[in-house]
Image (spheres, coloured by chain):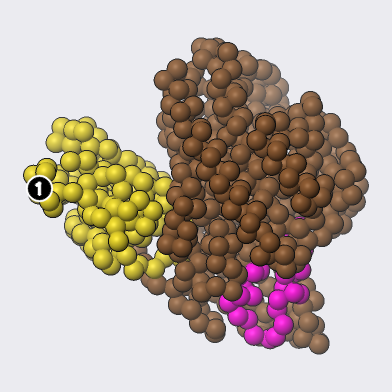
Chain colours: A yellow, B brown
Amino acid sequence: MTVLVIGYGNPLRSDDGIGWHVAGRLATDPRLEGATILQRHQLTPELALDVSHADLVVLVDARSGPPPGTVATEHVDPAAAQTSGTTWSHHLGPASLVALARELYGRSGDVHVVSIGVGSLELGETLSPAVAAAVEPAADAVVGLIEARPTPGSPSAAGVAGA
Amino acid sequence: MTTEERPVTSTSTIVIDPITRIEGHSKITIHLDQDGEVSDAQFHVTQFRGFERIVQGRPIHEMPSIMARICGICPVSHLIASSKACDQILEVEPPPTGIDLRRVMNLAQIVQSNALSFFHLSSPDLLFGFDADPAKRNIIGVAQANPALARDGVGVRRFGQQIIEWLGGKRIHPAWIVPGGVDAPLSADTRDRILSTIPEAIAAIERALTWYKTTLVRYEEEALTFGSFRSAFMGLVDRHGNVDHYDGWLRVMDADGRLLADRIDPTTYQDYLGETVEPWSYLKSTYWKTLGYPDGVYRVGPLARVIVAGQMGTPRADMELDEFRRRLGRVPSSSFHYHYARLIDTLYAAERIEELLRGPDILSPRVRSFAGINSNEGIGVSEAPRGTLLHHYKVDDDGIVQWANLVIATGHNNLAMNQGVKQVAKAYVKSARLEEPMLNRVEAVIRCFDPCLSCSTHALGEMPLQLQLIGPDGALLDELMR
């Protein structure tokens, strides 16, 4: 099973960089041996190719709204992605990235988002205490998604075919 | 950060969902006269960055990395211009291989940024037309209607981004280019990996050119009204008079193909180029001093490069340039042709990267020269994706920056962009009420120039694009916001 983890955000805006911190933490985690781990500022159209090649894609991102440090996991529904509207061309949301991968390459991996509630978006490279404490739980959430995948070779372990 | 994706709302009234498809945020005002005709239009850049002030007091060795933060799209351009300015302050000449490796990364930057502009930002307009439903006029719409074109866009941009990442360790803000050269030599493995990706990149760019040339005939009207006016053009050329993105001399050509100036040492830019500011924009305007302000309008960027150069200097790009000139003449006046020129520029860059990587000394370990502070002033120049870029620093004897001036490609084009906006507004704004196709055309003429507002205004936060229609009494008649 090919696994792609993308931590994204702005690491110069404090908690917005949580995706980078989690990706950095996972880069040395033996539980993710063989996985591709990327740190990116945004989800860009070029990532559609990577998403199409992977069986499982986990996007790690900051989220405004929930209490700081709250870790949540969400599955990106391919059916919803197919009809997702987007007007930006510099960067995409998770559903649009899936849609683009399916349109251009005929498939996408099974995509999940691990999000972490933010406290501070001020200029700075350090995380606020509550968000810093969420790095490990967020990393564990990523690992949990990988471990929950069906055994390789089973029909549901393959990527999601495009329309 | 995750936010909800919202579908586009297509209305004929006020609100249009966020979309700009330019690098930054801006506002346009259109003024009507007593007869309801457009009398003037202004392109306001509403964000402020202030890097010229921020760097004062910083040590010179920090400058390339600080200046690269000006932009997430073209950081390499600022790295190069900044490092070249620092070279002058150190009074060092980088080793030839160091220069060639800088050239490779600069050209990779040209490729990825041009690909973003053409495929991701402009191809939706070109594929669907300027009157099309904005809900499909975006990259997902392109992927659905012409997936081969969209795949080529993804592929070409990845090609440029990967070279930057392979050389510099990351795609955005790599620190590999340093004063004196580059930080580490090229490995045979990295060279061979890059070389293996070039044939497909060239094929994709050529497919895009073929598609564009068949598409161009649909836009004869836009070509006549999208910033079509007589002006000078400026760009760097090498000792043969061919295009050069890294070094060389400034050449300025007028609308009739005559050289206004040639073999200008870029370090003397202040003798030729004036800079001014207007109260309605944070974007400086530059002008050709002998023609004065505001008459000294000139254009830079891909269109200027292919106009001022004798040839591109690579086989495929030269064939395309010949065809470009047969179709459009020696000095095409319309800014619409930035798109065409941008593709030729991209093709050249891919070919030139291959030439450089096949050079006999490209794997030399001698890639950097070292020195202390030997001069109190330095000026670095290069061709950024959007045109000629100048960094000018003055330092004290300890190498602490006392003063900095940045002449950014988008600033060179500011007067031309304002002329283009006014021309499109006169052609398409025919009532006291704004409608989406008007907005899109006014926006699209700016998009031809591919302005980078983050680069050129030195903003925290974002301001949405506003299009305002102002009556003869100064009253706001209508407004569209994104």
Taking depth in this image into account, of B334 and B461 the one nearest to the observer is B334
Answer whether residue B430 is magenta in the image: yes
Q: Quadrant of residue A86?
A: bottom left
Taking depth in this image into account, of B240 and B181 the one nearest to the observer is B240
* SS at mark 1 in the image: loop
* Residue B79: x %, y % from top left: 57, 34
Answer whether residue B243 is magenta in the image: no
* Residue B246: x %, y % from top left: 67, 31
What residue is rendered at 34% in x and 63% in y?
Answer: B3
What residue is rendered at 90% in x and 43% in y?
Answer: B258
Above or below: residue B475 compared with residue A121: below
What residue is rendered at 75% in x and 67% in y?
Answer: B225
Please report, as a chain letter, where disc 1 is located. A
For the N terminus of chain B, the quadrant is bottom left
The stretch of residues the image draws in magenta is B416-442
* Residue B298: x %, y % from top left: 80, 51
What residue is rendered at 82% in x and 37% in y?
Answer: B251
* Total labels drawn: 1
* Residue annotated with mark 1: A154
Q: Residues within 10 Å of mark 1 (few under 14, many from 20)?
A: few
Q: Magenta residues: mostly which secondary structure?
A: helix
Taking depth in this image into account, of A59 and B239 the one nearest to the observer is B239
Quick check: A88 left or right of B395?
Answer: left
Above or below: residue A27 compared with residue A60: above
Q: Quadrant of residue B42?
A: bottom right
Tell me, yes or no, if residue B398 can be seen here. Answer: no
Taking depth in this image into account, of B21 and B226 the one nearest to the observer is B226
Q: Quadrant of residue B178?
A: top right
